[in-house]
Amino acid sequence: MKAAGLSLKRRAPRGPGDRLARPVFLSCAVVTAAALVAVVGVLGVETVRFFGTVSPGRFLTEAAWTPFAEEPRFGVLPLLAATAQITVGAAVFAVPAGLMTAVYMEHYAGVRTERVLAGVTTMLAAVPTVILGYVALTFVTPVILRTLWPGTEAFNAMSACLAVGLMILPTVIVFTRSALRSVPRALMEAGLALGAGRGRVVARVLVPAALPGIVAAVFLATARAAGETMIVTLAAGNQTQLAWSPLEGLRTLTAFIAQSSLGDAPSGTVRYGAFFAVSAVLVAVTWGLHATGSFLISRTRAGDAG
Amino acid sequence: MSAVSAPRAEVPALAADDLTVRFGGRTALAGVTLEVPRGRVVSVIGPSGGGKTTLLRAFNRMNELVPGVTTTGTVRFNGVDLHGEEVDPVEVRRRIGMVFQQATLFPRSIFDNVVFGPRAGGHAGELQELAEEVLVAAGLWSEVAEDLDRPAMELSAGQQQRLCIARTLALKPEVLLLDEPTSALDPAATARIESLIHSLRRDHTIVLATHGRRQAARLSDFTAYLAGGELIEYGPTEALFTNPRDRRTESYLTGRIE
Ligand SMILES: Nc1ncnc2c1ncn2[C@@H]1O[C@H](COP(=O)(O)OP(=O)(O)O)[C@@H](O)[C@H]1O
Ligand SMILES: [Mg+2]
């Protein structure tokens, strides 16, 4: 280094951009936090008011949701069960398909195939959910499901599961790939050098080693599935019932919220409050899934270091 | 075993003939011709990047796993062309075992690591006995015997490398390819591995890539000096060390080339 380089004095004066950067960035961060507080606050206040009329115990245990009946009943279980059905159903499609696609991309595909698949994944992720819901309603149900099972209802859980599964597929693929990539590549070679086939090394070594990350991927994907609204409203309809068959329609937490927000419940009524209570349940579910996924990911990262 | 026939005494265990390996545009081995006699220890020395690893990997068809690699020339094992049509690379790797420079244990138990190869090969016999036998052979048994279900990653670096050797021995290979097995180890662990290699020479043909000139001198019958992908000199270890024919070999041995 030259002699002049030894001086630690500031050489150029700070411009206004430099001085303003910190407060500008900070205020953006504050707005983000404030928005979250506002959301939680609104949900919280209205939910507490709702529980003044309907006891939390009945809300959480009663098995009927009939807010429009003469004697309305506000048991959230049918909505919760419907959300669980859609989420699990979507995961049943998306997790095996996503896992296998990710393994294929990481350990079998050539450079070109991998690039094409990555492009397809990105494009799939960019398809708006309203399109996926529409495809479920106008193609999956009439063309595929009705051919297999002629009695399929126009609105049914199965088509929604398929479409939501397609929606979360990119999430599963992307996070599973990064979990697989955290396992040293040398392990594949070590396995092959011990006279094992690729499939065996994948199944016995690489996937087990990446498992915490893969489970995290599943949780993050299901958090998205549980919060999905457009697809389930379009494809599964809005019938409050426990769908005993996946070929019948149902109504999820999100579908009810979407319907309520169309504004047929006057502010201050019990039905208005129900909307917030259901929203609070939904947020609790998606946060729970998301937090579990994030926790597992942070733990695998820590595990790498140690 | 089908394509790879039974050894005859005069046929070398391994023979490379005009072997050239390129990774994309980069030549890693340039026309290497050398024979590894059965039951002997051959060390491969030379500066890093000289082609030692590539030569070892050519002996058990590992190079072909690298995208964009091209190999010309021949490699024979017991006289049989390793790239012959009927040769199964999986069978090749079971007969010619390899231990990598970095210990590459699976994040599983010690036992699972040891029996991974035999399980993959559909080993019929008692796995417990096999595990004990190869752990004894690798000089690790007394240290791990009481808890084979411990995660392999908990072992020390030297123990991990011995476990890698045990895992390869469990394949019952005829040839062992050892790629700088002590480069990441402290002197005490190195000494243990060296005495292990010394004991393994009774039943195996060994090719040992090493950075350590003295290690080559201590352990091997023959030494090959590889630099820039070329085989500069190859001969009995003692002759090569005391009386190198090539000036480049001499410079390397006297430490003028790193
Ligand atoms: N997988 C690979 N891809 C590209 N180049 C490689 C690869 N492996 C080795 N090489 C190149 O081949 C040459 C020989 O490397 P290597 O056999 O690893 O030498 P050594 O083991 O003696 O250090 C080096 O120039 C190295 O960069
Ligand atoms: Mg090397």
Image (cartoon, grey):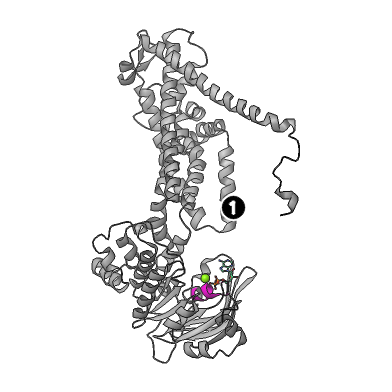
Q: Position of residue A167 (x, y in %)?
A: 51, 37
Query: In the image, what residue type sits under mark 1?
Result: Arg
The verdict on residue A75 being magenta is: no
* Residue A26 in sight here: yes
Q: Badge 1: how crowded within 10 Å, few (<14), some, or many (20+)?
A: few
The verdict on residue B52 being magenta is: yes
Q: Nearer the viewer, residue B166 or A92?
A: B166
Q: Position of residue A134 (x, y in %)?
A: 54, 31
Q: Is residue B190 above or below residue B201?
A: above
Q: Nearer the viewer, residue B241 or A293?
A: B241
Q: Is residue A69 above or below residue B37?
A: above
Q: Is residue A87 above or below residue B151?
A: above
The N terminus of chain A sits in image quarter: bottom right
Q: Which residue is mark 1?
A: A115
The residue marked by circle 1 belongs to what chain?
A: A
Image point (28%, 65%), residue name: B143
Q: Position of residue B178 (x, y in %)?
A: 44, 74
Magenta region: B47-56
**Quadrant of the rendered structure where residue A65 is?**
top left
* Residue B19 in sight here: no
Residue B24 falls left or right of residue A17: left
Q: Is residue A34 above or below residue B231?
A: above
Label 1 SS: helix
Residue A260 falls left or right of residue B189: right
**Quadrant of the rendered structure where residue B102 is?**
bottom left
**Quadrant of the rendered structure where residue B130 is?**
bottom left
